[in-house]
Image (tube, rainbow, N blue to C red):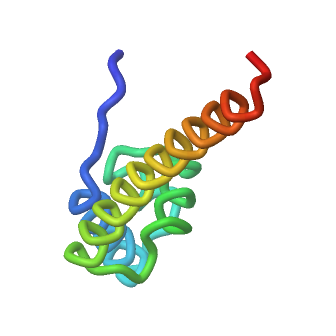
Amino acid sequence: MPRKRHKPEEIVAKLRQVDVFVSQGKSVAEAVREIGVTEVTYYRWRQEFGGLKSDQVRRMKDLEAENARLRRAVSDLTLDKMILAEAARGNF
């Protein structure tokens, strides 16, 4: 069975559904089963996305992607700098 990738907006909606089910008197295990994920997945999502709204989640994901892109750029420039320093010392 292929794994389903949930979008951040879907995750926030499912977390809210679980909150509604729990407030109606269902256990967390029953509520999680109704949204179609495992308890481990629910708790992982709650740790990462708990308390956020869907626009905040989208912004967070965009910032994480930009951060990863900038980290790659810095590492590339650092490597170039090290290569140039080696060449300048004459150690080739």
**Which image quarter: residue 15?**
bottom left
The structure residue drawn at horizontal position 39% and vertical position 84%, both measured from the top left corner, is 23
The structure residue drawn at horizontal position 23% and vertical position 73%, both measured from the top left corner, is 54
Nearest the viewer among 31 and 56 is 56
Q: Is residue 86 above or below residue 56?
A: above
**Which image quarter: residue 80?**
top right
Q: Is residue 2 left or right of residue 9?
A: right
Q: Is residue 63 left or right of residue 42?
A: left
Residue 62 percent location from the top left of the image = 28, 62
The structure residue drawn at horizontal position 68% and vertical position 34%, both measured from the top left corner, is 88
> Which quadrant of the rendered structure holds the N terminus?
top left
Residue 66 percent location from the top left of the image = 34, 58
Nearest the viewer among 1 and 66 is 66
**Which image quarter: residue 61?**
bottom left
Q: Is residue 32 above or below residue 63?
A: above
The structure residue drawn at horizontal position 27% and vertical position 71%, both measured from the top left corner, is 59
Q: Is residue 67 above or below residue 69?
A: below
Residue 57 percent location from the top left of the image = 30, 70
Q: Is residue 24 above or below residue 69?
A: below
